[in-house]
Image: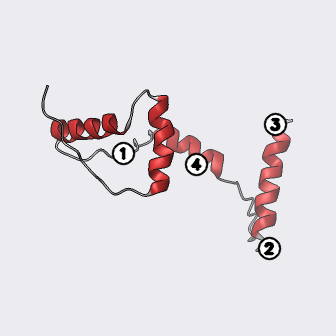
Amino acid sequence: MAESVLVSARVPQAKKDASKGVLASLGANTSDLINSAFDYLLERRELPTTAPASRPSREELDAFLAASTLDVDWRGEAPDGDYRSLVRDGKRGRYESLA
């Protein structure tokens, strides 16, 4: 077995305390975490980060826009300028269609 050395690092106390429970739930400890981080660094030659979010498909984007957009019945006139009323009326129409 390779010789072990002591590694020290400065982390916020709250972060260390919060991580302790997560590590315990995984059956791991701080040494396991540090060794995993070094293994990751050596294998990938980069720091571990959150994976980039995947781009939504065209269908997913269309569905999101349809769900988050209100139809405005302009009838040749602009709404009275009360945005809250416009949103409330639009949501009411959607909720009533579910009944």
Q: Nearer the viewer, mark 3 or mark 2?
A: 3
Q: Nearer the viewer, residue 53 or 98?
A: 53
Q: Is residue 67 left or right of residue 30?
A: right
Residue at coordinates 34% horizontally, 57% vertically from top-left? 10
Mark 1 residue type: Pro
How is the model colour-coded?
Answer: secondary structure
Q: Is residue 81 above or below residue 9?
A: below
**Dot 4: few (<14), some (14–19), or many (≥20) neighbours within 10 Å?**
few
Mark 2 packing: few (<14 Cα in 10 Å), some, or many (20+)?
few
Q: Which residue is mark 4?
A: 65
Q: Earlier in the sequence, mark 1 or mark 2?
A: 1
Quadrant (top left, top right, bottom left, bottom right) of the N terminus: top left
Q: Which residue in the structure is indicated by mark 2?
A: 80
Q: CA distance from mark 2 to mark 4?
A: 24 Å
Tell me the element at label 4.
Answer: helix
Which picture quadrant has residue 52? top left
Q: CA distance from mark 3 to mark 2?
A: 27 Å
Spatial CA distance of label 4 from label 1 is 22 Å
Q: Which residue is mark 1?
A: 52
Q: Which residue type does callout 2 highlight? A: Asp
